[in-house]
Amino acid sequence: MNLLWTKHKSTVAASAPVIGLILLAVLYIVVMQGDITPYNLNIIVNQLMITAVISTGAIFIFSIGAFDISLGAATAVSAMAGVLAFNASESLLVMFLVCLLVGVLISLFNSILAALLNLPVFVTTIAMLSVLNSVIEMLLGGQSKLSISSEAAASADTLLVKLSILILFFVICLFIFRYTPIGRQNKFLSANPVSAKQTGLSRSKLTIIAFAIAGIGIGLAAFLTIVRAPVLSKTTASSVGMDVLIALVFGGMPLSGGARSKISAALVGATSVVLLNQVLLALGFSSGVNQIAKGVLFLVVVFVASIGFRDKLLPR
Amino acid sequence: MSTNVLFEAVDICKRFDATVALDRVSLTVRRGEIRGLIGENGSGKSTLSSIIAGIQKAGSGSMTLNGQSYEPVNMIDALDKGVGMVVQERGTVSGITVAENITLGENSKYSRWGTINKKALYNQAEQALQGIGVTHIKASDPTDSIDMQDRKLIEIAKIMSRHPEMIIVDETTTVLSQYGREVIYGLMKEMKAHNKSVIFISHDLDELMQVCDSLTVLRDGVFIRNLEKPEFNEDTIKQLMVGREMTGSYYRDDYDGSYGEEVVLSLADGSKGDRLKQVSLSLHKGEILGIGGLSHCGMHTLGKALFGFEKLDSGIVEVAGGRRIRSEREAMELGVGYVSKDRDVEALSLQSSIKDNIVIAGLDHIKRPPFLILSKDEKKYAARLIEQLSVKCASMEQSVQSLSGGNKQKVVFAKWIGRGSDILILDCPTRGVDIGVKQAMYQLIYQLKSEGKSIIIISEELSELIGMSDRLLIMKDGRITGEFARSPQLSESDVISYMI
C-alpha cells in the first residue's frame, strides 16, 4: 500500500486541481439540487470571465517566479480610463483599446522600472498599488461613481463576445506558453535563476514580456468589467487580486513558478473559485464565512499539490 | 553480532518510482574502521549513505548502531544519535552566518527570552572551527560570502562539534584543495584513533586505497563485494565497480600536442579584483588548453570571465574576427559553451527534467522559424544527446535531481554539445564523476578536439590536466605563472612549484 502510494503520489498531486474542480462541480449540482438555470450559468460565466482572463495573463508573471500585487487596482484604473474614453468618444472600440493600452502600460511600467532599478518586480508592484489607488481617486474626480449607460454596453454584454475574448486570449497565451521559447524560458528562469543566466536567458527581457502579456489580460478584464457592470466605483475589482491568487493556486500553479508551471491552471483554478463561491452562497454562508472557507481550502490545495514533491531528496 | 561492530545495515532496499536504487544491500562498519564505499555513479552509494544519515528513509531493511535499533528521522536526529554526514553538494544554509550554520538545530541552547546570545553562539562556532584546525573563517561572516571549499569546512566543523560516533564523508574531497583534504584526512585519522568510524565515499581510487581500511563495492544498487586492505588492487576494484575489464587509455595516449594556428578565443589584460591580475591568454583551434592551480588561484574566475558570466574590471575577451564577449548571451551566440564547477547551483535546474535542462540551451537551434517550438522536436533533440552521452535515466522526463553526479554532468555536457559549441570552457569537468564516466568524458573531449573544437579545461587535478592538455597554464594569486607544452616527460613535480 505504502509502495503504491509512493509510486502514484506525484500523479495524484498533479491531478489534484482537476479532481478538486470535478468535486466542486458535483457539489454545486448537489447543493443546487440539480436546479441549475440559465440564470445561474450566466452568473457563473460572468464571474469566470474576469478571473480567468487575468489569471491567464498572470500565469506568465508567476511562471518567472514573480508576483504582482497590483492586479486588481490596475484592472480598476484601466476600466475607469476606458469609461472616460467611452464618455468622450461614444465608441466601444475606443473604450476597448484604451482599456488594453492602459492595462499594458501599467504592467510594462512595473516591469521596466524593476529592470532599470534592478529590483524584484514585486517591490515595484507594491509601490504601483499605492499609486494606482490614488489614480482611482483622481479618475473618480470627487464622484462616487463613473459609469456608462447599460444600453451602451449591451451590445458587448453577450455570451458570445465574452467567451470569444476569453477563448481567443487563452489560446494565444497557450500558444506562447507551449509553442514558443517564452514558456520554457520562464519556467527555467524561476527554477534556477543562476543556471538560467548561465544559459543566456535575460531576466529583464522575460519579465517585461511576462508583464506585457499580463497587461493585455488586465486590459481585457477591465473591458469585461465595464460590460458586466457599467458603473465603476472605488471598490471595483478590489477582490480581483486575491481571487486570481486563489485561482492560480487552486489550478495547481506553484507560487514560486518553476518546472511545474502550467497555463491550464488559470482556467481550472478560475472555474474552481467561481464554483466555490456559488456553493458557499447556495449553502447560505455569509461573506465572512465565505472568506474563511476559501482561506482554508487554499491551504488544503497548496498542501495536496505539494505532497508529491516534499521528500524527493537527492539519490545518486 | 560482534561487539566490535559499530554500525550494521541489513537488506536495505530503496526505490524511486520505477528505479531500484538499492536492492537488499547490507553494510557492516567496525569500530576504529575507515570503510570506503565505492561504485560507479548511480551505484547507490549516496542513497545508502543518505539513508544512514537520516536524509531519507529506507523502503525496507533494518539498521543498528551500537547494537541498538537505529532509525533516524532526519539528519539532526541521526547526529544526535551519533552519525553525521558531510554531503556531496551544498550542505550549508544560505542567508545566515557561519555561526548559525554551525549551530543549526541547536538555537534553543543560545536563546533566552526570545533573543539569541550571539556572543555564546560565535564562541561555540569559533571553537568548532578551531576544533578541526580552521582559523581563517570568521563565525560572524555571512555564509554566502564564503567559497565552496570553506563552506564544506563549515559543514565539517558543525558535524565534528557534535562528537559523532561515525561520520560519512560523501565525495567531499572533490571540492577541497590540498589544504581542505589534509583537514579532512586528519579528522578521519583522529576518529579512527578514538575507536570511532568513518564511511568514506570518493571516486578517487588512489585516495580510497590510501585512506581506507576496507572497501565495500556497490554496482547498480546491489552489493558486490567487501575488500580488506591487503586485497586492495586497482584493477580488481575497477573491474568490480564497472563489472567489466577497463580497457584502453584513461587519458589520451598521444603526445602530439599539435593544434591550429588560428586563435579562436583570447583574453587581453584581464583583471578582476585580486582574483585576476592582468591575465592574457589565447586558445587555438583544435587545442585543449589546461588551466591549473590551487583552488583560490583565480582560474575559476577566469573561466567565468571568458564566458562573460563574470564582468571584468578591465581587459577584453574576444573570439576570432574580433567580436567581443561581454555577456553569456554573446558568448553563446559566438559558439562558446561553459560547464560550471558548481553543477547543482549554476549549471542545472534540479527540479526540471533532463529534457528541459538539455533543451533550454538549444532552443534557438530547435525552433522552427520564426519562433515555433514543437514538443516532438524537443524530444528528438534531447533523445539524441541522451543517447550520444549515454545518460543513465528511466526517461527524459525524469527530474535531474534524481540522477547520479556523473549523469548530471553528462546532462550539462549535453546542453553545450547539443548547441554545437565550437569553444568549450570546462571547469572541473570530472568532479564527482566515477572512473567509467571519467574515461568516457576524456574520450569525448579528445573526440571534440579531433573535430576541430577548442577546449579549455580548468581543473585542480594535475594528472587530468597533464593527461589531456596540449598546453598547460598554471596560475597562482590571479596570475599565470607557468606554461608547459604537452610532453611525455611532463610530470606533476615539474609544475607544482609554479602553483605554490
Image (tube, coloured by chain):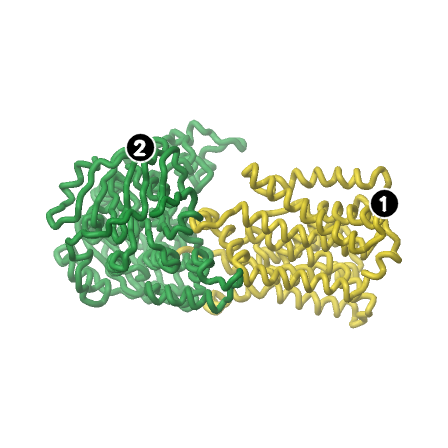
Rendered position, B305 above or below B273? below
Q: Is residue B175 left or right of residue A155?
A: left
Q: Is residue A122 left or right of residue B435?
A: right
* Measured Cα–Cα span from mark 1 to mark 2: 67 Å
Instruction: Check disc 2 and report the residue beneath it.
Output: B277
Q: Residue at x 17, y 64 (%)?
A: B247
| Label 1: which secondary element | loop
Q: Residue at x 47, y 65 (%)?
A: A6
Q: Label 2: few (<14), some or many (≥20) within 10 Å?
A: some
Task: Return the x and y of residue A267 as percentages of the image width and height.
Answer: 66, 62
Q: Nearer the viewer, residue A75 or A212?
A: A212
| Label 2: which secondary element | strand
Q: Which mark is residue B1?
A: none
Nearer the camera: disc 1 or disc 2:
2
Amino acid type of the residue that numbered disc 1 sits on in the rendered structure: Lys
The chain that hosts pointer 2 is B
Task: Return the x and y of residue B404 as percentages of the image width and height.
Answer: 35, 58
Q: Nearer the viewer, residue B173 or A97?
A: A97
Instruction: Check disc 1 and report the residue beneath it.
Output: A145
Q: Is residue B51 visible?
A: no
The chain that hosts pointer 1 is A
Rendered position, B336 above or below B315? below
Q: Which chain is green?
A: B
Task: Return the x and y of residue A289 as percentages of the image width and height.
Answer: 75, 53
Task: Return the x and y of residue B114 as percentages of the image width and height.
Answer: 54, 33
User: Residue lying furthest top in this view?
Assistant: B119
The picture's colour for chain A is yellow
